[in-house]
Image (spheres, rainbow, N blue to C red):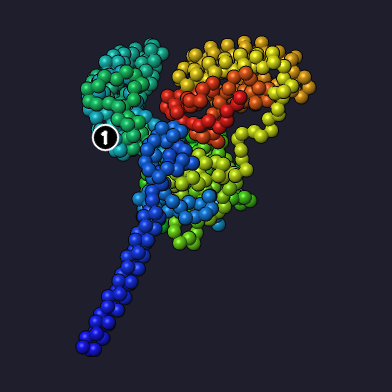
Amino acid sequence: MKKYLIYTSFLLAGLLLGWLIFSNSSNNETETEHKHSESEEQIWTCSMHPQIRQPEPGDCPICGMDLIPLEENSNENPLVFSMSDEAVKIANIQTTKIGETGNSENGIALSGKIKPDETASSSVVTHVSGRIEKLYVSYTGQSVAKGQKVAEIYSPQLISGQKELIEANKVKSSNPSLYNAAYNKLKNWKLNDNQIESILKSESIIETFSIYAQFSGVIKTKKVSVGDYLKEGEVLFDLQSLSKVWAVFDVYETDLANVKIGDPVEFTTTSYPDEKFTAKVNFIDPLINPSTRTISVRANIQNNNSKLKPDMFINGWVKGSPNQKATLLVPKSAVLWTGKRSVVYLKLPNQTVPSFEYRNIEIGEAIGDSYKVISGLESGDEVVTNGAFVIDASAQLNNQSSMMNQNLVNPNDNSTSSEIPDYVDQTDEKFKVQLNELLSTYYNLKDAFVNDKADLANSEAKNLLKSLEKVEMKLLKGDAHMYWMTQKNNIQLSGEKIANSNDINEQRNQFISMSNAMINSVKAFGVSNVSYEQYCPMADDNGAYWLSESNKVLNPYFGSSMLNCGEIKNEIK
């Protein structure tokens, strides 16, 4: 009996211990699942307004666009955005290390093409009118030697000229001038002395005559077929001699000062990579190519073995004067434009995950497929040349530094002025009424932009200028008077430009300046009715403001394309 009691005690103890273990495990599991669920809670944001954060999908309360999932970024630096290896592959992010270009040990590295020597081009023409009876050369690229027979022509002119010569030969002794005139006529038609003597000796008419090439070359263009009737001077073939060719290089403006006529040139071709060709610069084009911003530099090359073909790509070196300062270039594909600013993304070295730094740079003139770097980059920096916009968009969605989130790049930059003086209490009520009337015409101009009507904006700007003239500056004294002079001048200049333009984009650019002046005026002097200061982060690089009589956001800078993009920044009472 005692034995059974002991067993029973062990059994109960075991059951109790098991209950405690599994109960605790269950509680831990429930707590873990709860924490896991909380950590995986998805946040939704707006691509145009990344400050929006919502726990569920829906519409942006500012612009009405569909919200999208927010991608979290563990990097604490707002200028650096990190991506997973998988995301980098999906976005096809590609990078390039930039370096300085200029003189190497071999000279200035250049690229170019082989061009035909324009001074060695010629044409085979007929010197008499007639019909082509036979062609001895007949296709493009065929070689032609000087003196080679290329065609037979039947010419009534030549037949009549032969008859004149035969008759004039009969009276040669009594009328030598007639004979000489007939003889020279055939000579001018390019009959040689042997042909003319043969005619005089046989006193028989030759019906067809041969046309001979006066230069050697290959047929560049064929312009005639058998049976064609040609007028005097018409072209049968265009010939190009390839015994000499031109090596034409493109030299950037920054390197032009280091290239002189007579400088030695070496170059290679992809067809003969182990063979070097040498020449000297003998011509520098006086005109710059406006699209590539380069100047053509030419060297003459002997091509007796015909290895070099026109339009063949070449890489060479001009051994000019040493360049004192190399030029740093960044590929055009790496640069994102945001109006006045130029932005690139740099891949950071030695990172556990791919990380890209937002960087404002200053660039100069375009040089081929690159821009000259003035500041912001150094040789060896690795810039994103494909997929930079994807990185920027992802950074924007994560509320990090991007083209749209400029304030994150310059945290101290604030586009709203905090230095607007307060003259409300000392401003004459009559001036406030006049300012309120001016504000009404401003609202009409704003509505014209909301409705995308450039012609209406043109006329409303004229009405605003008339209303501006009615605002009496003499009602203000001292500093308030001077402050209004500045704002009035800005409003007037912008209004005149809008009134004289039919380009709505240009008009909207001027409306930004006008709106800033109107906001300053309303805040400084006060008006009788409530006015709403509204803001669009997409306009004018860093965002732009405007005034509205309604709290409903209707965007004048984008109109129907982004009508509700914006937010109320301030209510001016």
Which amino acid lies under the numbered mark 1 shown in the image of this protein? Answer: Tyr
* Residue 281 against residue 151 in the figure, above or below: below
Nearest the eye: 235 or 431: 431
- Of residues 505 and 461, the one drawn nearer to the viewer in this rendering: 461
Residue 106 appears in the figure: no
Image x and y of residue 262, in percent: 57, 45
Seen from this angle, which residue lies furthest right? Answer: 478
Q: Is residue 476 left or right of residue 164?
A: right
Residue drawn 22% across and 22% down?
227
Q: Residue at x 65, y 13 (%)?
A: 434
Q: Is residue 377 visible?
A: yes
Q: Quadrant of the N terminus?
A: bottom left
Left or right for 292, reference 243: right
Residue drawn at x 45%, y 62% is: 352
152 or 220: nearer the eye? 220
Q: Residue at x 24, y 26 (%)?
A: 225
Q: Is residue 393 above or below residue 567?
A: below
Q: Is residue 489 above or below residue 361?
A: above
Does 9 sit above or below residue 107?
below
| Residue that carries the numbered disc 1 in the rendered image | 139
Q: What count of labels does the image hold?
A: 1
Q: Secondary structure at mark 1?
A: loop
> Percent position (x, y) of residue 277?
45, 51
Neighbor class of circle 1 (other Cα within 10 Å; few <14, some 14-19, many 20+) is few
Q: Position of residue 395 (x, y in %)?
A: 46, 46
Q: Nearer the viewer, residue 157 or 100?
A: 100
Quarter of the image that includes the C terminus: top right
